[in-house]
Amino acid sequence: MKAKLIISLALMLALLAILPANFALAKEDDVIYNGIITRRYENSTTSVYKEMDKESKVLKYMNPGTKIEILAIYPDWVAIRYGTKGVGYVLRNRIDVPEDAKVFGNHPPYPVMEQDYYAVIDRQVEVKSDKSADSETLEILTPGARVALEGVEDGWARLIYKRQYGYIDTRMLTEIYPVASHIESADSSAPIAVFHSFFKDDPPRNNNLAVACGFISKVLQPGETMNFNDTVSPFNAANGYEPAGVLVDGELKKNYGGGSCQVSSTLWDTLMQLPGITVLLRKPHGDNAASYLPHGMDASSGTDNLNFIFRNDYDFPIRIDASTHDLCLFVAVYKEAE
C-alpha cells in the first residue's frame, strides 16, 4: 500500500466532519429504491414499526404487494416512507425490490451496502454492539485482521457484524484506508471494493474458509469468467478441505468443504459494488438467507444447482484478495496493472 493512500485517523475524522455520512438517518426526501411488500407470504400482513425493534410500536400493517419507497437500508431492516413525512421500519425479509424497480441517485443494486473504507488491525481491538465502551463486546480482533467500514460517527468506526452493526473506538485504529472513489482512475494500490463477514469458531469450517479464500485470490482478465465451484473445488482432503456443517435439503450435514458458501457470499457482496462486474448466476439460501450477513446478501454454492458465476466486464484486469483472520473473512478487489 503506497504511503500517499494511507489516510491518518485525524485527517479522516476531519473529512468526515464536513462530508455527509452514507449511513445518516433517513429523511423524507431520501428515497433510494422503489419496492413492494413481499408476496412470498400471501396470507400475511407486514408490520411497519416505529423503530428498528420488533418490540416497538407498530405503525401500520401492510398487505402483500403494497408499493413502498425505501429511504435507507440496514443489516436487518429498511426505512420506508410512512405517510407524507414520517419514517417507518420494516424487516428486510418482508420486502422485495423488483428488477425493474426505480433506483434513485448513484446507489448500488439492492441489497448491497457500500463500504467506503477499511482498516488493518494492529493491536487487540474490541468490536462493540453500540457506540459505548460499556456495550456488549461482539468480537475481539487481533493484529492482522482486516475489516470493511461504512464510516465514522461520534468517534466510532461503524461496520457490519452479521445482521447488526458493530463499532470500533477510532482511538484503537492507527489508520483508516479509503476505497478508491473513482474506479476508472484507480491504480493497484487501493481497492475498488471491500466487504467482510464474521463467523463462529468452528475449526474445520474455519479451515475450509481459509482454503477457499486462497483459491479465489487471483487475477481476472477483461472478459474472463469465474465459476466459483470450479475455482474452489474439488471439495476433498487432497485440496485441504475438512468435513464441516453444510445444509443439504434443509438438513445440516457434514461434508468436505462445508462453509464455502460464506466465501462465495462475501465475494458476491464485494463484487456487487462494482458496476463493471456481470453476475451470470447467483442463488440465495432462501427466504431466511444466511445468518452471517445482512438479510438477503448471500450467494449459495457447492453443488451443481448452487453456484456463483460472474464475468469481469471492465477493460482492465481485477485482482481478488481474500483471507481470514480471527473470525473475520475479508475480501478486497483491486484494479490490476495491465
Image: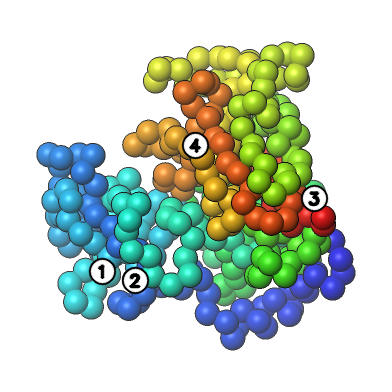
Is the Cβ of the residue at disc 2 closer than 8 Å to that at disc 1? yes
Q: What amino acid is found at the position of numbered circle 1 in the picture?
A: Arg
Picture quarter containing residue 79?
bottom left
Measuring 72% from the left and 70% from the top, which residue is drawn there?
185
First along the sequence among labels 4 and 2: 2
In the shown orientation, is residue 120 left or right of residue 85? right
Relative image position of residue 236 (x, y in whole percent): 69, 14
Disc nearest the viewer among 4 and 3: 4
Type of the residue with mark 4: Leu
* Residue beneath disc 4: 281
- Disc 2 or 1, which lies upstream in sequence? 2
Residue that label 3 marks: 143
Label 4, secondary structure: give it. Answer: strand
Residue of label 1: 81
Circles 1 and 4, Cβ within 8 Å, touching? The answer is: no
| Nearest the eye: 2 or 166 | 2
How far apart marks 2 and 1 lie (CA) works out to: 8 Å
Q: How crowded is mark 1: few (under 14 residues within 10 Å), some or many (20 or more)?
A: many
> Percent position (x, y) of residue 267?
61, 43
> Circle 2 sits on which residue?
31
